[in-house]
Image (cartoon, rainbow, N blue to C red):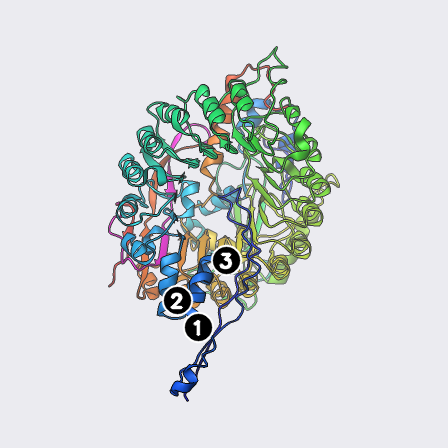
Amino acid sequence: PKLLLSTLLIPSSTHTHATSSSSPHAPPIVIPILDFDLLSVCLMTMEDPDIKKCRLSSVTVDDVIEQVMPYITDPKDRDSASLVCRRWFEIDSETREHVTMALCYTSTPDRLSRRFPNLRSIKLKGKPRAAMFNLIPENWGGFVTPWVNEVASSLPRLKSVHFRRMIVSDLDLDVLAKARLDELEALKLDKCSGFSTDGLFSIVKHCRKMKTLLMEESSFVEKDGNWLHELALHNTSLEVLNFYMTEFAKINAKDLESIARNCRSLVSVKIGDFEMLELVGFFKAATNLEEFCGGSFNEEIGRPEKYMNLTFPPKLCCLGLSYMGPNEMPILFPFAAQIRKLDLIYALLATEDHCTLIQKCPNLEVLETRNVIGDRGLEVLGQCCKKLKRLRIERGEDEQGMEDEEGLVSQRGLVALAQGCQELEYMAVYVSDITNESLESIGTYLKNLCDFRLVLLDQEERITDLPLDNGVRSLLIGCKKLRRFAFYLRQGGLTDVGLSYIGQYSPNVRWMLLGYVGESDEGLMEFSRGCPKLQKLEMRGCCFSERAIAAAVLKIPSLRYLWVQGYRASTTGQDLRLMSRPYWNIELIPARKVPEVNQLGEVREMEHPAHILAYYSLAGERTDCPPTVKVLREA
Amino acid sequence: MSKVTTELDFFGLEKKQTNNAPNKPKFKKLLDRRRSFREIQGAISKMDPEIIKSLLATGANPSETSTRSLSVPSTPKEDHQRILISPVHAPLTRPSTELVSGTVPMTIFYNGTVSVFQVSPNKAEDIMKVAMETSPKKDKSMEKHLSVIPPTTLRTKLFGQNIDGDLPIARRKSLQRFLEKRKERVVSTSPYFPTWA
């Protein structure tokens, strides 16, 4: 009898990493019983009919995998499973519930629906990350229209849509609304643009069972507040309402209050600027509220007690109150001990105020603020907030007099933080000074760090300890779980040797942003010999030539996305073709002059150096480019 | 305000003094832009490259301690005497004059002038050490020690081998908007109201 034995190995997924920052609620999903380190499949072909009766089991492998597959949610595991055989591919296709496309131009809508007809949820990203920093032309692309049309025609099970940095029109929203109706549960227009409140109205009118409605940081035309009113009239399922960092001016506090009253499951609300005293009714009604961000404090001389009687819902544990100053801060004290997430990025607190507040929040898990927190604030954080998991320190005002003079972060704060908050998983910080030693201590103490981002500000002429070669090496070696890494320095910040360390010691890193690193093309070449899992690389202000960049791209094995601004262009501009290969799209945004308003209110033409954007795609070259984007066509 | 005595302001102390000058009106402090590291480099890079090239080309005297001083006005922004020392290993076109092996041009920006010296790396280091020592040691709280700009990087900046012009650290849109709005709030409130507590 012939015996066919196939043993298949499927890599295990790491169930321990935190979910993305865009879903603040969802806990990490862990399925401990299914460990796919080794899944063996034995197929026995028997010629002898007698032996047929002794089949090992009447249950086939296919039956098993059909039951098991839905529990496999990690996309990497699904990817592996789909490669086993045709049947497994089919089962994966039929049962895949969610797809994230890191760049919407990597495939086509019909490919998506043909392969995954039963999708429940999609997340598409459009513009490069640099768009969040005003570096990408507004009309660059990322139009949702073809995707919405595909959803309408071919994705009948879709419940959740998340568009990030894309262009959405009212018509798109209308098509989506009418196609999915009450089945649409979640819509996230995340840093999108191109629509108006009419489109929102259409969504709210047709999709009465919305649970999540998000428009954070989107820009749109506000015609009226009817969409919110409509929500207030007919929706009782809302759980998450988010229009943080938007400029709505025509919404009615009464509508917010109605929504709070009608939607008993409302747990998270983030709004734009809105006078806090007008939200008293809303806060009273939102009894199950756990998270609130936005609002606005407007102090009045002669009325120091203006906000003293503000009370908050009993379960509130995540908040960020815009323009909150030290006079208003005490309203948080009664429940500071239960605060888990604090957003102080848009507050008006000095260093001392940070220290005062942080001391009262021993259960803090997430903190976002500006560098006004200072080294002293970080020391307090290290002493008091042992459960801290995520820390983001943004860049405050450069102009003198606008920020606390103490409000700078340096190696002193980093060391205190590393020693004190050893649970940290995510850390992003703008520093004014740095040493190798402080990076070493991060490598020593922060063993759970998955995401580390450091930007060295350019105010201080001299930095205590450059280059950072040894520090970054220690950090990378120590933080074994690192998957995302950003290192933005200045000339002299990292030598070629240091850059080679980054390549050499980043075995698990998937995404990197490198700014002003290295000294020459040699550094980039050495770097490209490492980073085995690097999928997405962003570089800015580097001294590398087109030729070196192209060569490096070809060497990095997992690279599927590249963005560069600031490089040594070749005289012909054709050296980029050295990285031409099948399915690899290469695009350029040539250097432009953009009129911008500077700090003093003057209109100046700012030079924007050229960008390179390159990515793998099954969709062929883009056909919807604006004039500012040039596709490097096949020679 | 230009000082009468010539001081080697290698440590950028004058910036600190400016900040703490008690008689400087507050609004002027507000308007003074903090000179960033990049701006200084930018100032150098904005100098006429032809001037720089000709300076280096004429630095041909093989004597180790030769000096050839050319008064070239640097950017008028510099009110204060500043010295910037950068050993420049310049690969520019130079006339057929041979360099003494082991010496490279060292360019010194001082008091609005540019000087080029042909020195060995050791001599260059000595000169830099001397410059550091003569700089007056102010308060002990200035614990930071000097970090010299490595030559290769300055070279790339000077001779445009890097990107055209400066690439300032970009600001996040959301933060930009917040800072602008905050400024508006400060301006619109009464002048007696503190900007921040």
Mark-to-mark CA distance, 1 and 2: 19 Å
Q: Identify the magenta region.
A: A599-626
Whether callout 1 and callout 2 share a subunit is answered yes
Amino acid at dot 1: Ser
Q: Could you tell me which residue is drawn at 39 percent across and 21 percent down?
A: A250
Measured along the vertical axis of the image, is residue A116 above or below residue A188? below
Name the spot of residue A25 as percent of width and height, x first: 53, 42
Q: Residues within 10 Å of mark 2 (few under 14, many from 20)?
A: some
Asked where in the image residue A581 lies, by quadrant, the reply is: bottom left
Q: Residue A58 carries which label?
A: 1
Say whether residue A562 is visible: yes
Quadrant location of the N terminus of chain A? bottom left
Q: Mark 3 lies on which chain?
A: B
Helix, strand or loop status at disc 1:
loop
Q: Which mark is residue B59?
A: 3
Q: Could you tell me which residue is drawn at 57 percent across and 51 percent down?
A: A452
Say whether residue B96 is visible: no
Q: Mark 2 lies on which chain?
A: A
Using the image as rendered, state which of residue A416 and residue A384 is in the foreground.
Answer: A384
Q: Is residue A108 left or right of residue A568?
A: left
Name the spot of residue A377 as percent of width and height, x first: 67, 37
Q: Residue A88 carries which label?
A: 2
Name the spot of residue A523 as percent of width and height, x first: 50, 63
